[in-house]
Image (cartoon, rainbow, N blue to C red):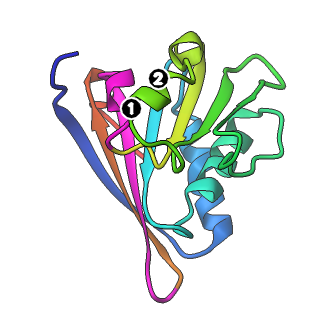
Amino acid sequence: MTDTVRTTTVRAEAATDGAMRALGARLAALLAPGDLIIMSGPLGAGKTTLTQGIAEGLKVRGPITSPTFVISRIHPSLGDGPALVHVDAYRLGDAAELDDIDLDATLADSVTVVEWGEGLAEELSEDRLEITLERRPDDTRALLFTGFGPRWADLRL
């Protein structure tokens, strides 16, 4: 895969878990089958909470919980939209272990969210949205959305 150029950067803040879920639902309205989202940030930053909002917006079957021990869950659509593939790469040692999950089989038809995917999942798609989350001392969250490739050239939240 060739080096993909960053095309867009958007910053956002969320003061509460509800605001984080609402931001995820707004993001879901922009998502389509084949989209890859890679999330990074420390424990408690809100990766799963944001994914819950994405799931709500996509109208997929829940509940959405962190797949830390099962590594990956597929949440089928309750309507006509794409399924959500929710991956937690925290326990994976390298990209080869992520490759063993065989995300290539579902990537084209689903929205794929990889928590803890930084440094592991970038090779899955040249077009991807990377989200870095930070939990501030006052419990608000700062988010940095970085789009790579033509798919994300005009990201607006």
The residue at which mark 2 appears reads as: 99
The residue at which mark 1 appears reads as: 95
Kind of residue indicated by mark 1: Ala
Q: Is residue 33 visible from the viewing direction of this image?
A: no
How much space separates mark 1 and mark 2, taking CA atoms? 6 Å
Q: Is residue 107 above or below residue 145?
A: above
Image quadrant in which the N terminus is located = top left
Tell me the element at label 1.
Answer: helix
Magenta stretch? 119-138
Q: Please give left or right for residue 86 compared with residue 117 in the image.
A: right
- Residue at image point 32% right, 25% down: 123
The image quarter in which residue 76 lies: top right
The image quarter in which residue 120 lies: top left
**Residue 97 percent location from the top left of the image:** 47, 30
- Residue at image point 27% right, 22% down: 150
Kind of residue indicated by mark 2: Asp
The image quarter in which residue 103 lies: top right
Q: Tell me whether circle 1 and circle 2 mark residues in contact (CB < 8 Å).
A: yes
- Residue at image point 45% right, 48% down: 39
Q: Please give left or right for residue 30 compared with residue 18 in the image.
A: left
**Residue 127 percent location from the top left of the image:** 33, 24
Q: Within 10 Å of the Cα at label 1, are there few (<14), some (14-19), or many (20+) other Cα atoms?
A: some
Tell me the element at label 2.
Answer: helix
Q: Is residue 120 magenta?
A: yes
Q: Is residue 142 visible from the viewing direction of this image?
A: yes
- Residue at image point 59% right, 62% down: 20
